[in-house]
Amino acid sequence: MKTISQFLPVKVIFGTGSIEKLGEETKQYGSRVLLVTRPWSKEEAPHFEKAKALLEAAGLYVVVYDKVVPNPTTTTINEASEIVKAEKLNVVVGVGGGSTIDTAKAVAVGATHEGEAWDYVYSETKTADKNKTLPIIAVTTTSGTGSHVTKYAVFSNPDVKVKSTIVNEAVFPRVAIVDPDLLTSMDAFVTATTGFDAFAHAFESYTNVNANRFMDTLMVEAMDIILNNLRKAVAEPENKEVRALMAYADTLAGMGIANVGTTLPHSIGQPISGKCPWVSHGQSLALVYPEFLKFEQDFCVAKAAKVARLANKAYETLSDEEAASHLSDEIIKLQKDTKIYTSLKKLNVPKEYIEELVRDAMNCPDTYVVNHIPTADEVRQMLLNMWEVE
């Protein structure tokens, strides 16, 4: 058995009503709070207002930054970092989905280090210092990104149209609060795309060349939950039991990428949303998966067969090779049922971007931890096939 090394320094508080712990948990790390959110919708407003009230009831000084955008950018992160400096804030609380929590993480670095947060993405010369980085408290309101339990902060630099990542244990949240009551305000599209994001995290951690038996067990459970509950979560938004299951699966999948990591779909999908910010992260992964699975499933047959059988028990009587061959079809069915099956063309991704996307994918470390490392020509063909999807 290979050596297993696991590290997850996040205190996870999971369950209905766990938001009530926000004030007492936060005050252990600071007294002056930057509360990071995005502009509130009518449906979401009560959740954010409650979070602010809980922090203030704990005696904390709270400054709200509510300009987070999907696919967060250096523009908003730098702006929020300056507020932290001006107000002498000492703890960052992110209440929202992955974009909000990633923004909070990047601000925790950008406000306390030389230069700006972007200087610390995949950097060989600048590394975020845990002792300088502000403590982060994450309250998740979506079930998909896993950001509340990872060491990653993903954001874009619009000046160069590149999306990249701070990869550093310094940005692990100190506390993650996962309250299913906060998840019912997600609309069908957000539910579907974030849920697929969670599936991608689990699948990529499971099939990664660095996978291990400890995390494999958790990833199988996460995928089983998602494959058998995502349709219901989309169709029944008020079903709290299903929302709780999806939140649990998301948390497990986040633990997977925190300890094992993502693979080729992220190295292709991330540049898509970096260059085309109207394409959400989860949607970009959904774009990649049908072609990725056709490419990858023959090189991890036993695991691909296992996942296919989670999706459809009819494959239990088939050989591994036969079961694995159905996996991409099962994922396409899931995407069609949840209305996220689409093409690059339909999402208005310019075809001339394909060469840049190939280049970016081949420069990303995630490309080199799949079971069959693709050539640039193979990545190009995947993207061309994604363009022509009907």
Image (tube, rainbow, N blue to C red):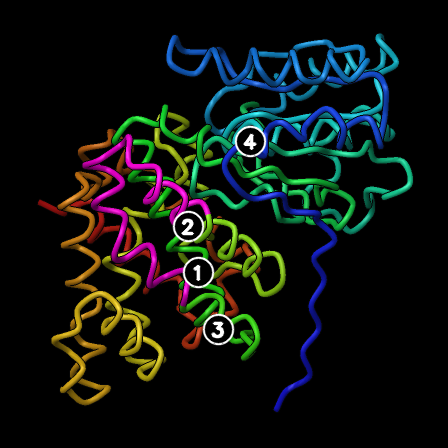
Q: Are marks 4 and 2 in contact (CB under 8 Å)?
A: no
| Secondary structure type for disc 3 | helix
Q: Which residue is mark 2?
A: 198
Q: Which residue is mark 1?
A: 202
For residue 91, above or below residue 234: above
Residue at position x 21%, y 46% from top? 231
The label shown at residue 376 is none
Amino acid type shown at disc 2:
Ala
The span picked out in magenta is 221-247
Q: Which residue is mark 4?
A: 156
Amino acid type shown at disc 1:
Ala
Q: Quadrant of the N terminus?
A: bottom right
| Secondary structure type for disc 2 | helix
Residue at position x 23%, y 74% from top? 309
For residue 330, above or below residue 189: below
Amino acid type shown at disc 3:
Thr
Q: Are marks 2 and 1 in contact (CB under 8 Å)?
A: yes
- Residue furthest out toward the right: 131
Q: Residues within 10 Å of mark 2 (few under 14, many from 20)?
A: many
Question: Which is in the foreground here, disc 3 or disc 4?
Answer: 3
| Secondary structure type for disc 4 | strand
| Secondary structure type for disc 1 | helix
Q: Quadrant of the C terminus?
A: top left
The label shown at residue 217 is 3
N-terminal of the pair, mark 2 or mark 3, is 2
